[in-house]
Amino acid sequence: MAKAQSWTCDCGKVVINFNLSSAARVVCYCRDCRAFARYLDHANILTPAGGTEVVQTLPERFDFVSGKEHLACLNITGRDRLRWFARCCNTPIATTLSSRFIPYISVIAAGFPDATTIGPILAHAHRKHATPRIKGDMGNMNRVMTGMALRAAASFVTLGPWKSPFRAPDGTPVTEVQHMSDDERAHIYDQPAQS
């Protein structure tokens, strides 16, 4: 596994360095990940079955090299996930949870120069939402969930939840959270996986 990687938005203004000494590659087929890509006009990052390849790691392993001022945040459903993107070119960056006390980030793999160097895809999540339905080996979600729990525990030991670049000192998001309207969400949900 490559321990250090740089992530870059489409226009090159946002550059992020990662420490990926512990990370997991996953393909997620949930409707919200798909809606995130479509809302930002980035359906090109989706797989033929509507999946999004992501790299799961810890927020404190982010280091903005440039472009943090372009960081924007979207909440699709009103629930606990915050979707981060580069407003300079609408490139999807990552998903975090709304609580700083659950140290988790799922980074869009398309921004890495070669995500395959991070390691193999460990699992395909939310397979029931794939369009068309996919068959074959879906990987090991138990391994993915165990890795998430171990990373979270290690994060608390090093006070990681207080070091996230996505959080202000008081724990709130560093930028105003946009909210997708019900009509926008319904329209995007109704679209096919690929068009």
Image (cartoon, rainbow, N blue to C red):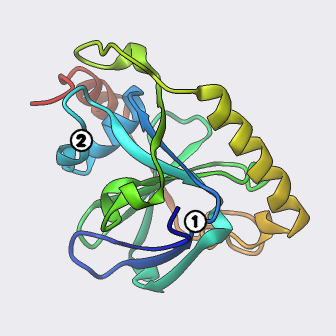
Q: Name the residue under label 1.
A: 20
- How far apart are the alpha carbons under marks 2 and 1? 27 Å
Q: Which amino acid does label 1 sit on?
A: Leu
The numbered mark at residue 38 is: 2
Which element type, helix, strand or loop, lies under badge 1?
loop
- Residue occupying image coordinates x 57% and y 65%: 20
Vertical position of residue 20 compared to residue 138: above or below:
below
Q: In this view, does 97 lie to the left or right of 65?
A: right
- Residue occupying image coordinates x 25% and y 18%: 131
Mark 2 or 1, nearer chain start: 1
Q: Where is residue 88 in the image (x, y as percent from the top left)?
A: 27, 73
**Residue occupying the far bottom of the picture:** 66
Specify whether residue 42 is in view: yes
Which is more toward the observer, 37 or 47? 47
Vertical position of residue 111 compared to residue 24: above or below:
below
Q: Position of residue 190 (x, y in %)?
A: 23, 20
| Residue 157, quarter of picture | bottom right
